[in-house]
Image: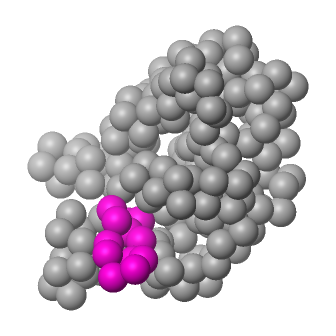
Amino acid sequence: MKLHSYWRSSAAYRARIALNVKGLAAEQVAHHLARGEQRTPGYLALNPQGLVPALEVDGEVIGQSLAIIEYLDERYPAPPLLPREPMARAQVRAMALTVACDIHPLGNLRVLNYLRGEFRQPEEAVNAWARHWIETGFVALEAAVRRHSGDGRHSYGSAVSLADVYLVPQMYNARRYGCDLSASPTLVAIDAALRERTDFAAAAPERQPDAGA
Protein backbone atom coordinates (compact mmCIF):
# COMPACT_ATOMS: atom_id res chain seq x y z
CA MET A 1 0.00 0.00 0.00
CA LYS A 2 1.05 3.56 -0.70
CA LEU A 3 -0.39 6.53 1.20
CA HIS A 4 -0.23 9.96 -0.40
CA SER A 5 0.01 12.34 2.48
CA TYR A 6 1.24 15.65 3.92
CA TRP A 7 2.50 15.88 7.47
CA ARG A 8 0.18 18.68 8.58
CA SER A 9 -2.97 17.52 6.77
CA SER A 10 -5.50 16.45 9.39
CA ALA A 11 -7.28 14.26 6.83
CA ALA A 12 -4.04 12.40 6.11
CA TYR A 13 -3.43 12.22 9.86
CA ARG A 14 -6.69 10.25 10.17
CA ALA A 15 -5.57 7.72 7.58
CA ARG A 16 -2.22 7.29 9.32
CA ILE A 17 -3.94 6.62 12.63
CA ALA A 18 -6.23 4.02 11.05
CA LEU A 19 -3.32 2.23 9.41
CA ASN A 20 -1.44 2.16 12.72
CA VAL A 21 -4.43 0.93 14.71
CA LYS A 22 -4.78 -1.90 12.20
CA GLY A 23 -1.06 -2.64 12.36
CA LEU A 24 -0.66 -2.02 8.61
CA ALA A 25 2.39 -0.64 6.85
CA ALA A 26 2.10 1.80 3.97
CA GLU A 27 4.75 3.66 2.03
CA GLN A 28 4.23 7.40 2.45
CA VAL A 29 4.49 9.78 -0.49
CA ALA A 30 4.52 13.42 0.60
CA HIS A 31 2.83 16.23 -1.33
CA HIS A 32 3.57 19.68 0.08
CA LEU A 33 0.16 21.34 0.08
CA ALA A 34 1.43 24.89 0.66
CA ARG A 35 3.61 24.57 -2.45
CA GLY A 36 0.79 23.16 -4.56
CA GLU A 37 2.41 19.77 -5.10
CA GLN A 38 -1.02 18.13 -4.91
CA ARG A 39 -1.97 19.95 -8.13
CA THR A 40 0.80 18.58 -10.34
CA PRO A 41 -0.32 16.76 -13.51
CA GLY A 42 1.13 13.49 -12.25
CA TYR A 43 -0.80 13.53 -9.02
CA LEU A 44 -4.01 14.78 -10.65
CA ALA A 45 -3.82 11.84 -13.04
CA LEU A 46 -3.71 9.59 -9.99
CA ASN A 47 -6.26 11.45 -7.88
CA PRO A 48 -8.35 13.95 -9.90
CA GLN A 49 -9.47 15.77 -6.75
CA GLY A 50 -5.90 16.80 -6.07
CA LEU A 51 -6.30 16.22 -2.35
CA VAL A 52 -4.62 14.14 0.31
CA PRO A 53 -4.89 11.51 1.53
CA ALA A 54 -5.14 9.00 -1.27
CA LEU A 55 -4.42 5.31 -0.86
CA GLU A 56 -2.98 3.18 -3.65
CA VAL A 57 -3.82 -0.48 -3.12
CA ASP A 58 -4.27 -3.45 -5.46
CA GLY A 59 -3.96 -1.26 -8.54
CA GLU A 60 -6.71 1.10 -7.40
CA VAL A 61 -6.66 4.56 -5.85
CA ILE A 62 -9.03 5.53 -3.03
CA GLY A 63 -9.53 9.19 -2.22
CA GLN A 64 -11.21 10.76 0.82
CA SER A 65 -10.17 9.77 4.32
CA LEU A 66 -13.53 8.28 5.29
CA ALA A 67 -13.56 5.98 2.26
CA ILE A 68 -9.98 4.94 2.96
CA ILE A 69 -10.64 4.20 6.62
CA GLU A 70 -13.86 2.29 6.01
CA TYR A 71 -12.10 0.25 3.31
CA LEU A 72 -9.35 -0.63 5.78
CA ASP A 73 -11.93 -1.50 8.44
CA GLU A 74 -13.83 -3.78 6.09
CA ARG A 75 -10.76 -5.49 4.66
CA TYR A 76 -8.92 -5.76 7.99
CA PRO A 77 -11.74 -6.05 10.53
CA ALA A 78 -9.63 -6.48 13.67
CA PRO A 79 -9.59 -4.37 15.69
CA PRO A 80 -12.87 -2.86 14.50
CA LEU A 81 -13.30 0.90 14.18
CA LEU A 82 -17.08 0.66 13.93
CA PRO A 83 -19.31 -1.24 16.39
CA ARG A 84 -21.43 -4.09 15.08
CA GLU A 85 -24.73 -2.95 16.55
CA PRO A 86 -26.51 -0.63 14.06
CA MET A 87 -27.36 2.16 16.49
CA ALA A 88 -23.85 2.20 17.92
CA ARG A 89 -22.39 2.32 14.39
CA ALA A 90 -24.67 5.23 13.55
CA GLN A 91 -23.65 7.17 16.67
CA VAL A 92 -19.93 6.66 15.96
CA ARG A 93 -20.40 7.70 12.33
CA ALA A 94 -22.34 10.78 13.42
CA MET A 95 -19.43 11.87 15.64
CA ALA A 96 -16.90 11.34 12.87
CA LEU A 97 -19.10 13.17 10.35
CA THR A 98 -19.46 16.14 12.71
CA VAL A 99 -15.75 16.62 12.14
CA ALA A 100 -15.60 15.52 8.50
CA CYS A 101 -18.63 17.49 7.27
CA ASP A 102 -19.29 20.34 9.69
CA ILE A 103 -15.91 21.37 11.13
CA HIS A 104 -12.99 20.40 8.94
CA PRO A 105 -14.21 21.70 5.53
CA LEU A 106 -14.53 25.26 6.82
CA GLY A 107 -10.90 25.24 7.97
CA ASN A 108 -9.51 23.45 4.93
CA LEU A 109 -6.42 25.08 3.38
CA ARG A 110 -8.31 25.74 0.13
CA VAL A 111 -11.03 27.61 2.01
CA LEU A 112 -8.60 29.64 4.09
CA ASN A 113 -6.53 30.54 1.03
CA TYR A 114 -9.71 31.70 -0.74
CA LEU A 115 -10.44 34.01 2.18
CA ARG A 116 -6.90 35.34 1.97
CA GLY A 117 -6.83 35.73 -1.80
CA GLU A 118 -10.29 36.50 -3.13
CA PHE A 119 -11.63 38.34 -0.09
CA ARG A 120 -8.34 39.97 0.95
CA GLN A 121 -8.79 38.92 4.54
CA PRO A 122 -5.82 39.49 6.87
CA GLU A 123 -4.25 36.54 8.65
CA GLU A 124 -5.86 37.51 11.96
CA ALA A 125 -9.34 37.34 10.40
CA VAL A 126 -8.61 34.03 8.66
CA ASN A 127 -7.44 32.47 11.91
CA ALA A 128 -10.50 33.84 13.73
CA TRP A 129 -12.71 32.19 11.09
CA ALA A 130 -11.01 28.82 11.64
CA ARG A 131 -11.26 29.14 15.43
CA HIS A 132 -14.95 30.04 15.27
CA TRP A 133 -15.99 26.97 13.30
CA ILE A 134 -13.84 24.57 15.31
CA GLU A 135 -15.11 25.89 18.63
CA THR A 136 -18.73 25.90 17.41
CA GLY A 137 -18.50 22.34 16.13
CA PHE A 138 -16.82 21.15 19.30
CA VAL A 139 -19.76 22.32 21.41
CA ALA A 140 -22.03 19.77 19.73
CA LEU A 141 -19.35 17.09 19.63
CA GLU A 142 -18.60 17.54 23.33
CA ALA A 143 -22.26 16.87 24.18
CA ALA A 144 -22.40 13.74 22.02
CA VAL A 145 -19.13 12.33 23.34
CA ARG A 146 -20.05 13.07 26.95
CA ARG A 147 -23.25 11.10 26.40
CA HIS A 148 -21.61 8.08 24.77
CA SER A 149 -18.09 7.73 26.19
CA GLY A 150 -17.87 4.72 28.45
CA ASP A 151 -14.62 5.54 30.22
CA GLY A 152 -13.63 9.15 29.54
CA ARG A 153 -10.75 7.88 27.37
CA HIS A 154 -12.68 7.08 24.18
CA SER A 155 -15.37 8.94 22.26
CA TYR A 156 -17.75 5.99 22.22
CA GLY A 157 -17.79 3.15 24.73
CA SER A 158 -14.40 2.00 25.93
CA ALA A 159 -12.55 1.11 22.72
CA VAL A 160 -10.97 3.06 19.86
CA SER A 161 -13.49 3.89 17.16
CA LEU A 162 -13.82 5.92 13.99
CA ALA A 163 -14.88 8.85 16.16
CA ASP A 164 -11.50 8.84 17.91
CA VAL A 165 -9.65 8.64 14.60
CA TYR A 166 -11.41 11.86 13.59
CA LEU A 167 -11.22 13.62 16.95
CA VAL A 168 -7.46 13.63 17.49
CA PRO A 169 -6.47 15.31 14.19
CA GLN A 170 -9.17 17.94 14.66
CA MET A 171 -7.88 18.63 18.17
CA TYR A 172 -4.45 19.12 16.59
CA ASN A 173 -6.01 21.78 14.36
CA ALA A 174 -7.72 23.36 17.35
CA ARG A 175 -4.43 23.73 19.18
CA ARG A 176 -2.74 25.01 16.04
CA TYR A 177 -5.28 27.83 15.72
CA GLY A 178 -5.30 28.63 19.44
CA CYS A 179 -8.92 27.64 20.03
CA ASP A 180 -10.56 28.14 23.40
CA LEU A 181 -11.24 24.57 24.51
CA SER A 182 -12.61 25.36 27.95
CA ALA A 183 -16.11 24.33 26.83
CA SER A 184 -14.83 20.94 25.62
CA PRO A 185 -13.19 19.29 28.65
CA THR A 186 -14.29 15.77 27.65
CA LEU A 187 -12.77 16.12 24.20
CA VAL A 188 -9.55 17.49 25.68
CA ALA A 189 -9.26 14.57 28.12
CA ILE A 190 -9.99 11.92 25.50
CA ASP A 191 -7.55 13.48 23.04
CA ALA A 192 -4.82 13.47 25.68
CA ALA A 193 -5.48 9.82 26.55
CA LEU A 194 -5.48 8.72 22.90
CA ARG A 195 -2.24 10.55 22.10
CA GLU A 196 -0.53 8.44 24.77
CA ARG A 197 -1.15 5.34 22.65
CA THR A 198 1.77 4.33 20.45
CA ASP A 199 -0.42 3.91 17.35
CA PHE A 200 -1.83 7.42 17.66
CA ALA A 201 1.50 8.93 18.69
CA ALA A 202 3.31 7.46 15.68
CA ALA A 203 0.78 9.13 13.35
CA ALA A 204 1.35 12.62 14.81
CA PRO A 205 2.33 15.29 12.29
CA GLU A 206 5.65 16.12 13.90
CA ARG A 207 6.74 12.48 13.64
CA GLN A 208 6.29 12.20 9.86
CA PRO A 209 9.23 12.02 7.42
CA ASP A 210 8.25 15.32 5.77
CA ALA A 211 7.50 17.18 9.04
CA GLY A 212 8.40 20.84 8.89
CA ALA A 213 9.05 20.76 5.15
- Residue 81 in the image, given as x and y percentages of width and height: 64, 44
Q: Is residue 180 above or below residue 143?
A: below
Q: Is residue 183 above or below residue 104?
A: above
58 drawn magenta: yes
Depth check: give the residue in front, 164 or 120.
Answer: 164
Residue name at image x 74 percent, y 42 percent: 160
Q: Is residue 174 above or below residue 79?
A: above
Residue name at image x 54 percent, y 85 percent: 27
Residue name at image x 26 percent, y 47 percent: 111
Magenta span: helix, strand or loop, mainly?
strand
Tally the numbered discs: 0
Q: Which segment is the magenta one?
A: 52-63
Q: Is residue 194 left or right of 89 when viewed as pictured? A: right
Depth check: give the residue in front, 166 or 156.
Answer: 156
Quadrant of the rendered structure where residue 22 is?
A: bottom right
Q: Is residue 173 left or right of 6 when viewed as pictured? A: right
- Residue 152 in the image, given as x and y percentages of width and height: 84, 26
Residue name at image x 86 percent, y 53 percent: 196
Residue sitting at the far left:
118
44 drawn magenta: no
Res. 103 visible in picture = no
Res. 37 visible in picture = yes
Q: Is residue 105 left or right of 17 when viewed as pictured? A: left
- Residue 80 in the image, given as x and y percentages of width and height: 67, 47
Q: Is residue 177 left or right of 186 when viewed as pictured? A: left
Colouring rule applied to residues: one colour
Quadrant of the rendered structure where residue 61 is?
A: bottom left
